[in-house]
Image (tube, grey):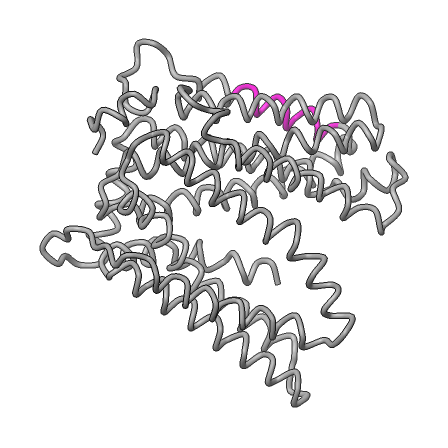
Amino acid sequence: MSAAFYLPWLALGLPAGALADRWPRRRVLVIADLVRAVLIGLLVAALALGWASIPLLITVVFAVGVAQCFFDAASQAVIPMIIGRDGDNLSKVNGRYWALDTTGRSLVGPPLGSLTFSVGRSLPFAVDAVSFLVSAALVRMVPDVRSEQPARQPLWASIREGMRHLFRTPDLRVLAVAMGVFNLGYFMVMGTFVLYAQRTLHLPNAAYGALLAAMAVGGIVAAANARRLIAGLAYRKVQAAAMTVQAGVWLVAMLTGNVWVIAALFVVYGAAASLASVAVGSARQALSPDGLIGRVVAAFRILGLGGAGLGALVGGAVAKSAGLDATFVVAAVVLVVAAFFTWPSRRQPNQANDHEGVRSGALT
């Protein structure tokens, strides 16, 4: 089921990003919301009529994931077109964006889904369908901003143009790879963490979700204050610092094996991850022309998902061959090495290495 949601990014992410750059962004957002509302509504009807099945659920989830590809690419592209590319403004707006996203996705959504499911098995899906209709109505209030599109080119040529921009922009290239490694380190540990929680922490099943919620709490607080916390810092420095923090969290968690200490560490990790998301999102918007942001976002997503999948596989193999503790150590080593190469050197050209370049308009 999880694969059905993320597979669209790997299969269709780049074409979706290219089309989102080509079409009017507000229209893409509204249509993506309406499509998701209809898909979830059909699932509600199937549940009510007793026609629901696992294959149907997987099909709907996959289709929702396709619409999500278009929505994510267009929504990230709209932000700089509305507020400009001032570094402080991007950090402020992206911080609020990720704070709200984390609140809904990780803190409010899961317990609300469980609660409504206990009332009626179709109720959480019905609420989800309505939420997409509300989103579509809100998105229609966004200014209908349009990017200046070059002469129409074939889809694959458009995709190649976006990839060339990503890999020829040093800071974007490094941040994309760093994000993949960040996810790799996280999923190396979290892929088997439920076993660690049971065997080492002796954590009851009911408390496992609460432990994970600590990440969301740290993420929400940090994202809401991102403008102040990362003001004046290079985007790559924020990403490198987040990777170092994650490495430290895994090592201390392994050494202590105390559930309360780990809960506090998860708050710290959540904060670091949110600040990295804000920095990466702001860098993509600051260093990409309006007509390329959708494709750049799609490429980042693909690298991020690739890192997550690889991390889960590697973590499982390490845990099986060397024990659960070894996943913490290996992940920490990989993260520290990657952080070293992510940190910008003084000899590198100043692209996103400080926010002054963004404020001056040099990066637009």
Camera-side residue of 291 and 26: 26
**Image side of residue 240 versus residue 211, left or right:** left
* Residue 1, above or below 313: below
**Residue occupying image coordinates x 30% and y 61%:** 26
For the record, the magenta segment spans 326-337
Instruction: Say if the magenta span includes residue 331.
Output: yes
**Image side of residue 331 versus residue 71, left or right:** right
Find residue 128 and report its image quarter.
bottom right
Picture coordinates of residue 186 (x, y %)?
Answer: 62, 36
Camera-side residue of 166 and 37: 37
Residue found farthest to the left: 151
**Residue occupying image coordinates x 24% and y 61%:** 23
Q: How many marks?
A: 0
Q: Quadrant of the N terminus?
A: bottom right
Instruction: Say if the magenta span includes residue 109.
Output: no
Residue found farthest to the front: 141
Picture coordinates of residue 327 (x, y %)?
Answer: 70, 31
**Residue occupying image coordinates x 30% and y 32%:** 86
Camera-side residue of 243 and 314: 243
Picture coordinates of residue 297 (x, y %)?
Answer: 37, 46
Q: Quadrant of the C terminus?
A: top left
Majority SS type along the magenta span: helix
